[in-house]
Image (cartoon, rainbow, N blue to C red):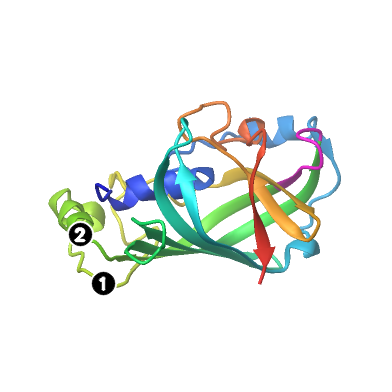
Amino acid sequence: MKTQSTCSIFLVMFSVMACRIQVEKSADKSEAKQGSGNVTGTSNELDGTWRITCTAELDSKGVAQSFKSFDMTFSGTKATKNLDAFSDRECKNKIISMRITGTMESGKILTSPQGAKSFDFTPVEYEVTHFAAEAVNTANYIGECGGGWVLGKKRIISKDTCSKNDEAFKDSFLKTYDIYKIQDGSLYMGQSDASDPNTDGTSPEKRPKEFQTSFVRR
């Protein structure tokens, strides 16, 4: 498998936290027409840790492009997302690890899809570690976040550590709009598509229209 740069993997694995986001003030006004309920920062039903272990990331044709283990931990208005991406089905050959911390607002009841509630996430900090030499070489060649990437060495990235013109991270700290539901003890987040401008999560109107694979509470 061809190893991808940080931003490419970021887009594949976290399309709901899209690399490009344009937030409009009018967006929040229009959302009020879509659902009911009050958002008080977070919905307590999310508190805890939810995990997917070694699952395939499929493309639009249903072909496995990469594999991941992914967990999310929520507490109040704080959210932490951890991703390990692998190149093999057994999840032994790690490509990248990423930890994203941020703030969230959740719990607004939406009209569609059935059972959906809002989940809005704003990243604050990334911890990124490359485990593939090709990815490190590519990141340094294009000057991703100023270069200086080292194989197996963690880097902490905030709004102030990368140039605003850095293609990999310049828009990675803006708010994204998702959906969720809890059913039979499992958490389902939205299945967004960064290539589809109608469901890329860049505004309340562009939330995902369906749910993805369930997370199981650890």
Upstream in sequence: badge 2 or badge 1: 2
Magenta span includes 113: yes
Q: Which residue is situated farthest in the front direction here?
A: 90
**In terms of secondary structure, where does tag 1 sit?**
loop
| Quadrant of residue 23 within the rendered picture | top right
> Which residue shows up at 46% across the image and 52% down it?
173
Q: Specify the amino acid type for callout 1.
A: Gly
Residue placed most toward the observer, 213 or 207 = 213
Residue 47 vs residue 11: left or right?
right
Q: Specify the amino acid type for callout 2.
A: Val
Percent across and percent down for residue 211 are 67, 42
Q: Does residue 128 appear in this view? A: yes
> Which residue shows up at 20% across the image and 68% down it?
150
Residue 115 vs residue 81: left or right?
right
Percent across and percent down for residue 158 are 39, 62
Q: Is residue 128 above or below residue 28?
A: below
Q: Does residue 42 appear in this view? A: no
Q: Is residue 104 above or below residue 211?
A: below
Residue 131 vs residue 13: left or right?
left
Percent across and percent down for residue 100 are 48, 62
Residue 196 vs residue 169: left or right?
right
Residue placed most toward the observer, 173 or 81 = 81
**In terms of secondary structure, where does tag 2 sit?**
helix
> Which residue shows up at 80% across the image and 30% down it?
33
- What residue is disc 2 on? 136
Percent across and percent down for residue 9 are 36, 49
Q: Is residue 48 above or below residue 83?
A: below
Disc number for residue 152: 1
State whether the magenta stretch is mostly helix, strand or loop: loop
Q: CA distance from mark 2 to mark 1?
A: 9 Å
**Number of numbered discs:** 2
Q: Which segment is the magenta one?
A: 111-118
